[in-house]
Amino acid sequence: MNRLFALALAAGIAATTCETLAAQDRADRPDKKEKEVKLKTRLDEKLKFMAGCWEGRIDEDTYVEEIWNNPTQNLMTSTTRYLKKGRATSYEFSRVVSTDSTVTFSASSEGKPFDEYTMTQLVDEYVLFENPKKSFPQRISYRLASNGDLIPRNEGEGQPSVEVRFKRIKCPGT
């Protein structure tokens, strides 16, 4: 009888220990779905190719300067200014925000409300954002050329695409 009681007690202790260890293991490990979401939305690894200070020419007299800060896991911001003969003629603020469900690019020119575009493609050093409800641009993309140039492109139905080839420049104030 004592032997049967000892076996039952040992089995109970073993079962409790196994359940406690399993519960600790579940608590220490995020569930698989949560881990996939975190990997999917990390901007710091996926969009770092855009970070830095860039300059491109639109025409003989007009330059564009775009400064993208280093991305964090969920946010990247930029300022853009358009210069004609050394004088600023326009400006824009942009941001890329990652949430659990989507990544969006938003841009506001000269204090107007932000226009939002959803990320639809991200491959190596290329990203595409789309908003089919807009007339122009409906698509905004950024890609890094093999020579290190950053090439933003705006596209829309019935309008010619706008593409600028940015060269990396020394950041202002450094």
Image (cartoon, grey):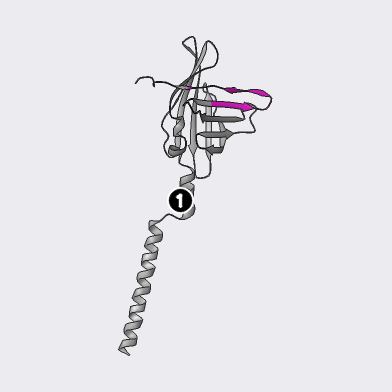
- Residue type indicated by callout 1: Lys
Question: Foreground residue, 148 or 61?
Answer: 148
Residue 30 figure quarter: bottom left
Q: Position of residue 143 (x, y in %)?
A: 52, 30
Q: Is residue 28 left or right of residue 154?
A: left
Residue 171 figure quarter: top left
| Residue at screen point 38% across, 61% down | 25
Q: Position of residue 45 (x, y in %)?
A: 44, 39
Q: Say if 31 sits above or below 121 in the image.
A: below
- Quadrant holding the N terminus: bottom left
Q: Which residue is mark 1?
A: 35
User: In the orientation shown, which residue stands out farthest toward the front?
Assistant: 146
Q: Dot 1: what SS?
A: helix
Q: Position of residue 166 (x, y in %)?
A: 49, 22
Question: Foreground residue, 156 or 102?
Answer: 156
Q: Position of residue 62 (x, y in %)?
A: 52, 13
- Stretch of the chain drawn in magenta: 152-166
| Residue at screen point 45% across, 41% down | 42
Q: Is residue 163 magenta?
A: yes
| Residue at screen point 46% across, 24% down | 79
Q: Say if 70 sits above or below 1 in the image.
A: above
- Quadrant holding the C terminus: top left
Q: Is residue 159 magenta?
A: yes
